[in-house]
């Protein structure tokens, strides 16, 4: 049915014809998400009539149908201005039962009306900055939080719970003030951790469920997304003992999430949200990933349960198969694994055994091949600086931040970026706290070690000597030609000669020489003029 005909019926005001026109329009456009420009003015007229009636108050019998039409029209960006006024947003919030100035919810609200109003609000907040600002001013997050808290006590339908959480996610994703309000004033981490525990149906003392049904999966993912929003800057903050206990509790639930299978084909997506949130937890709270007791079927290493670490490693391997949005896919799980390995020796030793097993075949470059080591080394030269940083950091930590060991497994050419950033180009070891453990070499590696090119990380045939057969005079002539070429390129600033500073950073050759001489003079007692 054309929007002009529907608008005419609404304007005429005859109850039966008006409601039939709206029901027909809703039925025909329930799956419409794009709209013809030629009918935009008619849609705006219809939206204006519906919003005006909603603001003035509708009889209960009309509300669900009315809101369904408004939901469809709220998808049209050309109609958004008609929805983004304070009275219209307040009217929708009243219908959804989340307007703060209202009294408590009625015992038996019409859930169809609540659901349609929530869907309208989600559409508006997603598409309109003005609606986002009005929703923040109206403190919708307060009543949404109350409803999340009461969801375990009152039997709200799944769809209402889901869209409560979806609206909460949109508000916290798009408004910093709402994010902070939920985190600080409304104790959002504790609130949502409890909601997640109820949704998963498992307490920290129990084994995780092996399978999460479809509706629980949908709600759990929305909870994880809201928690991610409000804890995004958490790793940069210090937490007190009470908060640390709360985050450890959350970490245990996330451990459950990583081990559970979700309904349909959503397991990978569900695990992704759990891993993203793990990356936001305070680093000292990640120890809960290694605390489960051993049981029949557990993967044990050095007396520690490695089930979760192994699950995260499997997740990483699956994410490496993706070719798009690699940063979003692999950076969070690499960061979590890096911090676990940095802080816990059993985790580092287990991961090193899986990712960097003793070298045997050194005839190919470290970045060539399909092993996990090869794939991660390839990431060390990725165009995205964040991707190559987290990949290099992970492998460096697995090498106990030992420069020689890092070069051994990755090649100096691949390792140079991280070493330059850390001031370790000259070798040595970073400042991390690691126990002394040996890196066992295979017989194959020992035999080939002397022939390995440290830059490429593989055995290479010796190239022919380009000066073979030349006289000394010819060699000197070629050498001077090379010197003159470099001099000319340097003077024209095509290249800049570089040197290594005493602290291991690359710098200009002149600066490197000056710093080296200054260091020698300052350490020489005979250079003191006194």
Image (cartoon, grey):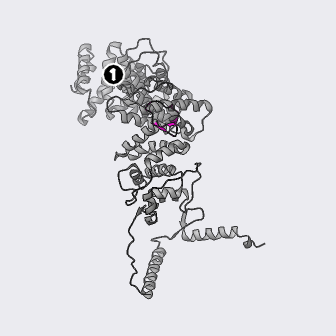
Q: Where does residue 131 sit, x and y in percent of width and height?
A: 42, 31
Give the vertical position of 178 relative to 49 (above or below).
below
Q: Is residue 418 visible?
A: no
Quarter of the rendering containing residue 282: top right
Q: Name the residue under label 1.
A: 67
Residue, x 55% and y 43% (percent of image)?
Answer: 343
Q: Toward the viewer: 471 or 23?
A: 471
Tell which of 181 and 391 is nearer to you.
391
Q: Which residue is drawn at 38% across and 72% down?
A: 463
Image position, residue 230 (x, y; %): 50, 34
For image coordinates 44% across by 88% down, the residue present is: 473
Q: Residues within 10 Å of mark 1 (few under 14, many from 20)?
A: many
Q: Is residue 293 magenta?
A: yes
User: From which residue to which does the magenta span run?
Assistant: 290-306
Classified by dominant secondary structure, the portion drawn in magenta counts as loop
Work out whether residue 81 or residue 523 is closer to the camera in this orientation and state it. Answer: 523
Q: Residue at the left extreme?
A: 1
Kindly state the secondary structure of the residue where label 1 is placed: helix
Instruction: Decide: is 469 above or below 438.
Output: below
Residue 97, image quadrant: top left
Q: Quadrant of the N terminus?
A: top left
Q: Is residue 162 visible?
A: yes
| Residue 219 % position (x, y) | 40, 26
Residue 325 position within the rendered picture, expressed as x and y whole percent measured from the top left: 37, 45
């Amino acid at each position: 049915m054309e929007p002009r005909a529907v608008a005419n019926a609404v304007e005429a005001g005859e109850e039966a014809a008006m409601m039939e026109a709206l029901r027909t329009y809703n039925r025909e456009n329930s799956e419409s998400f794009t709209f013809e420009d030629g009918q935009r003015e008619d849609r705006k007229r219809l939206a204006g009539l519906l919003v005006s009636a909603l603001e003035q108050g509708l009889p209960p019998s009309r509300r669900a149908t009315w809101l369904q039409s408004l939901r469809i029209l709220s998808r049209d960006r050309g109609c958004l201005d008609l929805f983004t006024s304070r009275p219209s947003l307040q009217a929708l919030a009243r219908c959804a039962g989340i307007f703060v100035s209202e009294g408590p919810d009625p015992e038996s609200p019409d859930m169809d009306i609540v659901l349609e109003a929530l869907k309208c609000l989600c559409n508006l907040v997603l598409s309109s900055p003005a609606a986002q600002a009005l929703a923040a001013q109206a403190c919708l997050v307060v009543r949404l939080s109350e409803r999340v808290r009461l969801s375990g006590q009152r039997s709200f339908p799944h769809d209402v719970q889901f869209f409560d959480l979806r609206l909460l996610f949109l508000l916290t994703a798009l408004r910093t003030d709402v994010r902070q309000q939920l985190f600080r004033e409304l104790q959002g981490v504790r609130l949502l951790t409890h909601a997640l525990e109820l949704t998963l149906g498992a307490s920290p003392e129990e084994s995780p469920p092996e399978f999460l049904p479809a509706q629980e999966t949908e709600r759990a993912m929305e909870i994880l997304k809201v928690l991610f929003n409000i804890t995004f800057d958490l790793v940069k903050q210090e937490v007190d003992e009470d908060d640390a206990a709360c985050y450890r509790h959350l970490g245990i639930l996330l451990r459950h999430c990583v081990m559970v299978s979700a309904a349909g084909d959503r397991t990978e997506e569900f695990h992704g949200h759990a891993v993203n949130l793990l990356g936001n937890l305070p680093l000292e709270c990640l120890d809960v990933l290694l605390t489960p007791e051993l049981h029949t079927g557990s993967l044990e290493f050095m007396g520690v349960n490695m089930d979760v670490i192994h699950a995260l490693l499997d997740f990483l391997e699956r994410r490496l198969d993706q070719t798009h949005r690699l940063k979003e896919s692999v950076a969070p799980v690499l960061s979590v694994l890096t911090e676990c390995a940095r802080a816990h020796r059993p985790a580092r030793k287990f991961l090193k055994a899986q990712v960097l097993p003793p070298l045997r075949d050194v005839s190919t470059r470290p970045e060539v091949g399909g092993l996990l080591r090869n794939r991660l080394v390839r990431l060390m030269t990725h165009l995205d600086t964040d991707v190559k940083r987290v990949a290099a950091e992970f492998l460096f930590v697995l090498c106990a931040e030992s420069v020689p060991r890092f070069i051994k497994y990755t090649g100096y050419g691949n390792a140079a970026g991280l070493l330059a950033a850390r001031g370790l180009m000259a070798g040595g070891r970073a400042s991390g706290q690691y126990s002394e453990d040996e890196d066992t070499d295979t017989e194959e590696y020992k035999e080939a070690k002397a022939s390995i090119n440290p830059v490429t990380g593989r055995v290479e045939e010796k190239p022919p000597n380009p000066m073979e057969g030349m006289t000394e005079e010819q060699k000197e002539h070629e050498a001077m030609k090379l010197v003159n070429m470099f001099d000319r390129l340097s003077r024209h600033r095509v290249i800049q000669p570089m040197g290594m500073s005493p602290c291991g950073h690359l710098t200009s050759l002149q600066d490197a020489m000056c710093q080296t001489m200054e260091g020698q003079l300052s350490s020489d007692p005979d250079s003191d003029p006194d």
